[in-house]
Image (tube, grey):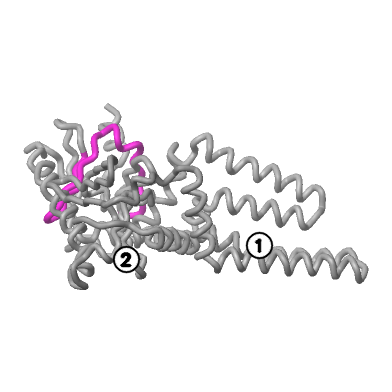
Amino acid sequence: MNYKISEEDYVSVLEQQLKQKRKSPVQLFVFLLSTAGQMLVVCYLILSTHASGIRAAGLAALSVILTALSLVNFLRLRPRAKNYFRVLRAKGKISEEFWKLHTLKLEGEKLSVRFGSISNSCGITQIRVADNKVNAYLLHLGQTQSIFDIVPYSAFGNEKQRAEFPETIHQAAFQCSLSGSEAIRDSISPDARVLAEFTYGEPAYLKDQRNAFRRMFTTKLAWMPISILLLVIPCIFLFYAISSGRIVLVLLAIAVMILLNFHYIRIFSPLIDRHIRRDAKELLPYFPDGRFKVYLDQARKQVVLAGSIYCMSFAFPEIKAVRKIPGGAACYLNQNLVFTFPFAGDVSEIQSILNK
């Protein structure tokens, strides 16, 4: 398909990305901190220091101005998107070739795009489609939000074609994944050991994943040097703030600790269920009936998670740790990925096999 992208299309996509970021718990926490949080601190300062009329009025006015600026920044996304677009163009982040005719092609397992003298391609399974609900689709790479291309609504001949576009991309990726899945299934050795055969419903899956993420803190994956620093530095700041006896510093130290360690705080809060459900939604088309078999294939040094229509394999070195969870086991991979399964045996035996 051929199409051209306008500046309006690009700005609309940037606006949609800002809307998505605004929904993140960290962004919401920063917004509350910069509005209600700082207003409470100012009220405390005025009351605790018995500020004079002029000083109290000055602090109150400053608080109102900061709150207004935060509200404008949080709610007025269109001007921010336009400004970001101007910055990108000024810094040469958007090539002038980008405004020429685009040609998007789906060829086998690859999606390619060409505009002017520039071309790009990637595996169709890496592509995600986001609809800005206004005038364009955004094709981005996985969860990174890196833009692969923008497809304006005007690229489609009619409304039916436009509405079917996301499903067309999804089905192409799905079929590509299935073809690779059959090769994995065929690679399982005849003497591979079946660790578990089970059916997962949503409540059981949520419970096991929740337990697995929290159990991660018994592995080295949760205690990388950077994560230790993110915990130790705010603790030192908090200790200093408490010893100084200044409530404002204590509140600031707590806010810094929450911001820097939100990923880990989320694991021990109900917010983790939202994260698990989001990931499960992407997996559901590949495992529609929730039926699984887990194979430990020592001959080929792989663990295979096999469903009725789809298989995933993990080489032994990819599995960084195995831990017992209530009623089952959890296998930990890089990038906070984890898969769980019911298992009544000794997980240390599995771990020793993986380490050979």
Residue on which the image places disc 2: 203
Question: Which residue is at 48% across, 48% downward?
Answer: 88
Question: Which residue is at 66% across, 54% downward?
Answer: 254
Mark nearer the viewer, 1 or 2: 1
Residue 47, image x and y in percent? 85, 69
In the current view of this chain or complex, which residue is farthest to the right? 52
User: In the picture shown, does residue 132 fall above or below 222?
Assistant: below
Q: Could you tell me which quadrant the N terminus lies in?
A: bottom left
From mark 1 to mark 2, how far is it between C-alphas? 37 Å
Magenta-span inclusion, residue 305 = yes
- The secondary element bearing badge 2 is classed as helix
Residue 135, image x and y in percent? 34, 67
Front residue of 356 and 9? 9
Residue 14, image x and y in percent? 43, 58
14 left or right of 185 in image: right
Tally of marks: 2
Secondary structure mainly formed by the magenta segment? strand
The residue segment tinted magenta is 303-327
Amino acid type indicated by mark 1: Ser
Whether residue 270 can be seen here: no
Residue on which the image places disc 1: 34
